[in-house]
Amino acid sequence: MSNIDRQPSIFTVQDASKIAFTLYGLQAEACPLPGELDHNFRLQTMAGQEFVLKIAHAGQQRDILDLQNKAMIYLAAHNPSLLLPQVCATSTGESTGLITASSGTAHFVRLLTYIPGRHLAEVKPHTPELLYGLGNLLGKLDATLQDFRHTAAQRTLKWDLQHTLWIREYFQHIAKPERRAIVENFVEQFETHVLPVLPTLRQSVIHNDANDYNALVSPVDKGSEPALSVIDFGDMVHTYTVCELAIAAAYAMLGKADPLNAAAQVVAGYHSAFPLSETELEVLYPLICSRLCISVVNSAYQQKVEPHNVYLTISEVPAWTLLAQLANIHPRLAYYTFRHACGLPPCPSTGALIQWLTSHASTFSSVVEPDLRTANTVIFDLSVGSRELGNLLNVSDLAWFNRHIFERMQAAQSSVGIGKYNEVRQIYTSDTYKVEGNNGFEWRTVHVGLDIFMEPGSSVLAPLDGIVHSFHNNAAPLDYGPSIILQHTVADGQLTFFTLYGHLSLDSLNSLAVGQPIARGTAFAKIGNDQVNGGWPPHLHFQIITDMLAKKGDFPGVALPSQRAVRLSLSPDPNLITCIPAERFPAVGLSAEQNRRLRSEHIGRSLSISYQQPLKIMRGLMQYLYDENGRAYLDAVNNVSHVGHSHPRVVKAGQEQMAVLNTNTRYLYDELVLYAERLCATLPEPLSVCFFVCSGSEANELALRLARTHTRRQDIVVVDVAYHGNTTSLIEISPYKFDGPGGTGAPPYVHKVPMPDVYRGQYKSSDPQAGEKYARYVDEAISQHQGKVAAFICESLLGCGGQIVLPDHYLEEAYRHVRNARGVCIADEVQVGFGRVGTHFWGFETQGVVPDIVTMGKPIGNGHPLAAVVTTPEIAASFNNGMEYFNTFGGNPVSCAIGLAVLDVIADEQLQQNALRVGQHLMDGLRGLMDRHALIGDVRGRGLFVGIELVLDRATLAPAPDQASYIVNRMRERGILLSTDGPFHNVLKIKPPLVFTAANADFLVATLDEILGEICSV
Ligand SMILES: Cc1ncc(COP(=O)(O)O)c(C=O)c1O
């Protein structure tokens, strides 16, 4: 379907240069460009100007070329802002020239300006903005061409969608019967739904071939919207204007897991530039399908003509795949989606239905007994962030869920519980709720019915007269079980809608017949138990449906967040019938927008938010975080949730201790000393005295005090780019901050030494002495300041520095120099401690050293604000100089109980071993990408502390921060959370909770592979 050159050109590049000179007076070098029938060349002059020389195939009619030229000239004159090829005149002022080939054939020649860019087909990903931009360009183009007329445009083309029926004669060329059936069905739709209304639609001259090879995406400045252009006006015709959009949308849908979503973006863009009528929107989807049908039938026929042309077979594959996808989409669902894209109510009849239901509210019978208008109901919060559901693991335990629901109802002495409409839930865990979208997996999470929890066997009553539309036992786990759909025709036959009753008892389906009348108030079914209702706590799922979309006995009760508006329009609020008083429903949480507004008002702006599209996180479980749409994100960067987000054992330890006692360290309680003993047992002698604090910063702050008191000196040696915390004295020893924006440089008593970076630094990994050589800088820094060093502070692997693994012997040698000067060695383990490095529990152990002070934070409390300093009895004794050290919260019983639970989980779940195994697997996978992606300069790390350094050039090591930022944002879109670090912000940082699995690592590597592939196409 693309314009790939399929025949050798009869013109050489020399011919093209000669023609350019003769006809246009241009001295230019030519290189061939693809062209289906024409011979196209790209010309470049000495001055750098670029053109496209188009030599028409012999036999090309002049008036068609004139149509194209005139249209391009008209567009340039009437809308110069459009990025389109411009027609260049010959030296004699003609827009079309004529040449004779050596074979004697005459050929028309045209010269157009060259539009730099890549074919849309080759650009990945097709972002919503890009697709919107395509639609917008075409909308503007068609709006401009509205009054353009040309006699040659009044022609009959096989690619003109109004003539779709011609393909019927060629159906026999489609070999596979199932494929033929798809095309036959779409053509029938065209005949019955499109043809009769076509004459009422507006007509104009259109481009008629905005396929993904004719749409160009031009390079733009950083941060700007992509610039789109369309080339090849060869199929221009006067026809129904909406065909333009149908063609572009058809190609924009190719290769998409969710084609409708992609098309909706193009439609939105088009509509914003050139508003579509409701009838145009109605025929759009069948027209899109028509274009694809013409395309596949055309290539099926061509294959008969050219049986050995492999290209024909290959090029039709994506179109067939798309047609098969579209065969499963009801045309009215597409219509509603397109209406929504244009800002219209998705389902046109819903407004009238809501009005009717509102004005007849008093006439409805209650769906259950007691009447929900007056009953004492418990309204449940089953939303993603629901506190009453607690840990996500509870919810997948259906027995727990069942107990919870009925215990709460019992406690409230209520026989009815309500689960809300339009609630985003995390409880739909089976694979039937998981769908592949255009950016990875999406989950159906939005509940579009009302749940009425009641004892099994409770009667279900018809709220108004209706007939049985359909019924079915949807028996899969977590599905509806037995369900009945009633059809209601109201407002003197003007309105038809449906009500769905799910999770019924099996015998509710006995002796029912389609079409059977069910009178208002009739008890026609019963609530089923968990044995038959899909495994759920007994309840009725009650839903209104405005359009069954040809379904029977089933209709989705939970929607994809991306289809929320359309699905809510298809299923308006069931409380229009049940009429539970609005004030019973508690207020819903803040929207992401409201949250951001309040944040900007009340939270200091010096705190940035991650990602271009910030995430509103509602809950976490192990290595996953869930956003407000219930989408799961693989957390590959949060080393704080060390043993997993909301790990149930850690949560339980904290909750249990908080329920009994929380006090300060001036009392005796066992948790403090038992925890101190356990923590010290992980450390080598003589590290045996603990101070508990509340943050890594506090830990480092105290470490400085310990060192300074012990040595009675003030000077500190720090490693470049290090970050040690947010207090005044820690900013002073953090080059990452004092050398960064807003920083004022190092104070005189802080001495910076280069990072021992064997990738980018002075001594490389090939130098076996690199560790010793980098350590010499520590010695030099001490000597330069008369040996008066209080402490050398260094992370055991460098975090902000860019996930750097220290070279062998670095700390050993550095510590030797420091100790020779009677300074103290501080190991900052705030990022890397507690088994993350896999081979050892502590990062410093990988260097074979024993520090004098170890500081711990982040992972120590799995997210609870706990941190610690552990030192030697000698240093602790120096600190005991009369000035008391007290910390109100540090070491409280709750923190200690949590700290103990973290140590238990690390040991019991063998997380250190997991870090080693999965970290190695991850690094192997990442290193495997290096052959394919030159952007990856280095993959380094230990265990699950991994860095990927991105460079523009592996020889010069020019950093690639823009690419790193692009990757982090794209990975987030694909459901993986990462971040960047390093002095040039070009290192992708991976430090997930230690429960990360090999499958998680594979997913990360595969997704990164795809996104790196996009980068060459941006
Ligand atoms: C190495 C290192 N030390 C100390 C800190 C400070 O810890 P906190 O933010 O808990 O105060 C951090 C925080 O990022 C860190 O990375």
Image (cartoon, grey):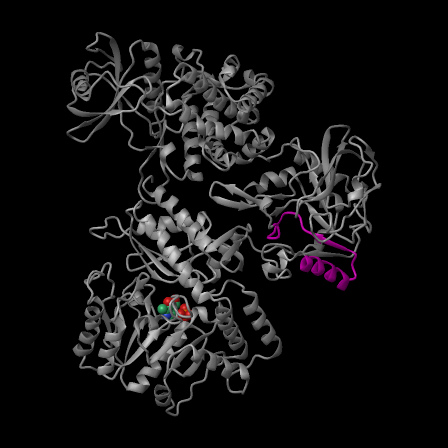
Depicted 660 relative to depicted 23: above or below: below
Task: Tell which quarter ligand 1 is in.
Answer: bottom left
Q: Residue at x 43, y 81 (%)?
A: 691
891 or 727: nearer the viewer: 891
Left or right of 363 on screen, residue 605: left
Q: Where residue 416 sits: x, y (%)? A: 77, 54
Can the viewer see residue 723 in this picture?
yes
- Farthest residue in the top direction? 104
Instruction: Quadrant for residue 668, please give it.
Output: bottom right
Q: Is residue 550 magenta?
A: no
Q: Residue at x 60, y 48 (%)?
A: 430
Q: Is residue 409 magenta?
A: yes
Start-end of magenta stretch? 399-428
491 or 182: nearer the viewer: 182
Q: Where residue 210 sits: x, y (%)? A: 41, 25
1009 or 389: nearer the viewer: 1009
